[in-house]
Amino acid sequence: DVKVTQSSRYLVKRTGEKVFLECVQDMDHENMFWYRQDPGLGLRLIYFSYDVKMKEKGDIPEGYSVSREKKERFSLILESASTNQTSMYLCASRPTGVYGYTFGSGTRLTVV
Amino acid sequence: GQQVMQIPQYQHVQEGEDFTTYCNSSTTLSNIQWYKQRPGGHPVFLIQLVKSGEVKKQKRLTFQFGEAKKNSSLHITATQTTDVGTYFCAYNQGGKLIFGQGTELSVKP
């Protein structure tokens, strides 16, 4: 079965910390995505990647960066965590073409 | 920019009643996808519609894409408690998936 795995289900970090959220997919998908989900705001795209070492900004990239050194892994980095980055973070992947996305189970990040 | 409006935001039904959520765009969409997110879960892909006027069924779920490709609907016949969750429509734009705000469905047994 197709799988997207996010390394942590829950995470608590302090303001100013550097935070790494990891996502791995086992489907050989070219495209990977990071969303955040907040009540009342829905799912918003942070960054996405079409290929290894490629990245594109989504709708809300400020305060985030990403890394894709290998096809199966897409990391989201919060350079200096702030309380307004407390959210549910969802990773997704899809093959090239117009197909449905497969989402990971999400990481609920709390910044205190 | 282009966006989709999804209505209603919330819907509470008695088990056995029907449910419909609507997704409306001011511009033509190339395709539309539907996802379901259970409480505490993550979005799960249900279906994709591409053709004008397309209708697809999955058991008690019926999906429609409007003739003008500006709107779509998801209809559930005879809801069950397992249908509880938030239903999102989403469309592709430049390789990105843009989501509607979702309709949260609750079902009273």
Image (tube, coloured by chain):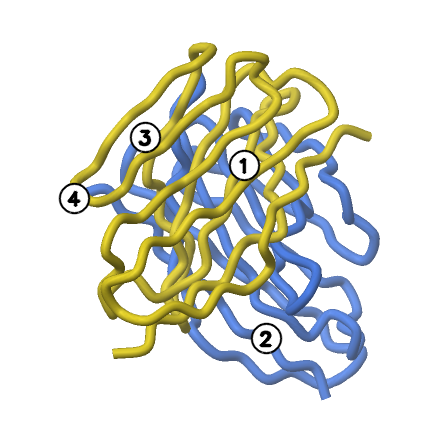
Chain colours: A blue, B yellow
Drawn side of residue A71 relative to residue A78, left or right? left
Which x, y percent locates residue A110? 63, 81
Which x, y percent locates residue A85? 73, 70
User: Nearer the observer, disc 4 or disc 3?
Assistant: 4
Label 4 crowd (10 A; few <14 / some 14-19 / many >=20):
few
Q: Which quadrant is the N terminus of chain A positioned in?
A: top left
Which residue is rendered at x = 55% and y = 53% of the image? Answer: B102
Q: How far apart are marks 4 and 1 (CA)?
A: 23 Å
Please give the residue where the numbered disc 3 appears in the rendered image: A28
Tell me the element at label 3.
Answer: loop
Which x, y percent locates residue B103? 52, 56
Tell me the element at label 1.
Answer: strand
Q: How far apart are marks 4 and 2 (CA)?
A: 27 Å
Drawn side of residue A2 relative to residue A61, left or right? left
User: Nearer the observer, disc 2 or disc 3?
Assistant: 2
Q: Which quadrant is the C terminus of chain A positioned in?
A: bottom right
Please give the residue where the numbered disc 1 appears in the rendered image: B90
Q: Distance between the residues labelled 3 and 1?
A: 23 Å
Please give the residue where the numbered disc 4 appears in the rendered image: A1
Q: How far apart are marks 2 and 3 (CA)?
A: 27 Å
The kind of residue on which mark 3 rests is Asp
Label 2 crowd (10 A; few <14 / some 14-19 / many >=20):
many
Q: Are marks 4 and 3 in contact (CB under 8 Å)?
A: no
Q: Distance between the residues labelled 2 and 1?
A: 25 Å
Label 3 crowd (10 A; few <14 / some 14-19 / many >=20):
few
Kindly identify which numbered label has been placed on residue A109.
Answer: 2
